[in-house]
Amino acid sequence: MVEKERYNKRIASFMELRDLQKRKLDFDMERGWDKSRASNVFVHLIEELGEIGKHVSYEEGYKKSNSGHTPNLSVEELKREFAQVLMLFLQLSNHYSIDLEKSFKEELEIMEKRFNIRQ
């Protein structure tokens, strides 16, 4: 129980997911991006996930950098790709009015029961 409390305190020091979602919605509304079609946002999300996948493929040696072109495999670029994925995911969840923080907590409770490690 002590470990879980320490974990919860550490997580609480970060920006709440709800705050991230609201900030992204405000950002999108200022630019008119909140009117983007969900299908376009989804395709863009998959494209950015593909960039992360490309990084993993090269890092693990599945693809070789001498195969015609070498992507930017820097950690800084990978950070940007993860941030882009998160932003698009937030935009898509905002489109459907999904409270991700609430949904995450509910799903985590389900998973904790389903995959109980204290059997």
Image (cartoon, helix red, strand yellow):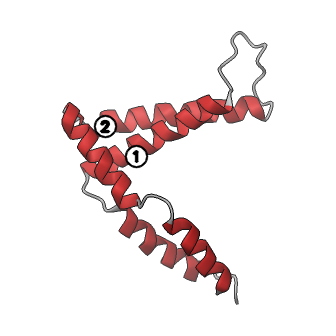
The numbered disc on residue 89 is 1
Quadrant position of residue 26: top left
Residue 55 is left or right of residue 40, and the answer is right
Quarter of the image that includes the C terminus:
bottom right
Dot 1 amino acid type:
Phe
Residue 57 in view (yes/no): yes
Q: Residue beneath label 2, please?
A: 39
How far apart are the two marked residues, 2 and 1, measured between alpha carbons?
12 Å
Looking at the picture, does residue 50 appear above or below residue 93? above
The correct choice, above or below, for 2 with respect to 11 in the image is below
Locate residue 102, reporting x and y percent. 36, 69
Under circle 1, the secondary element is: helix
Residue 37 is situated, as x and y percent measured from the top left of the image, at: 24, 36
Residue placed at 40% from the left, 46% from the top? 89
Q: Residue at x 78, y 35 (%)?
A: 60
Q: Compared with residue 6, is residue 21 higher up or lower down, i.e. above or below? A: above
Q: Please give the name of the residue rendered at 51% of the width and 64% of the height, measured from the top-left corner.
A: 13
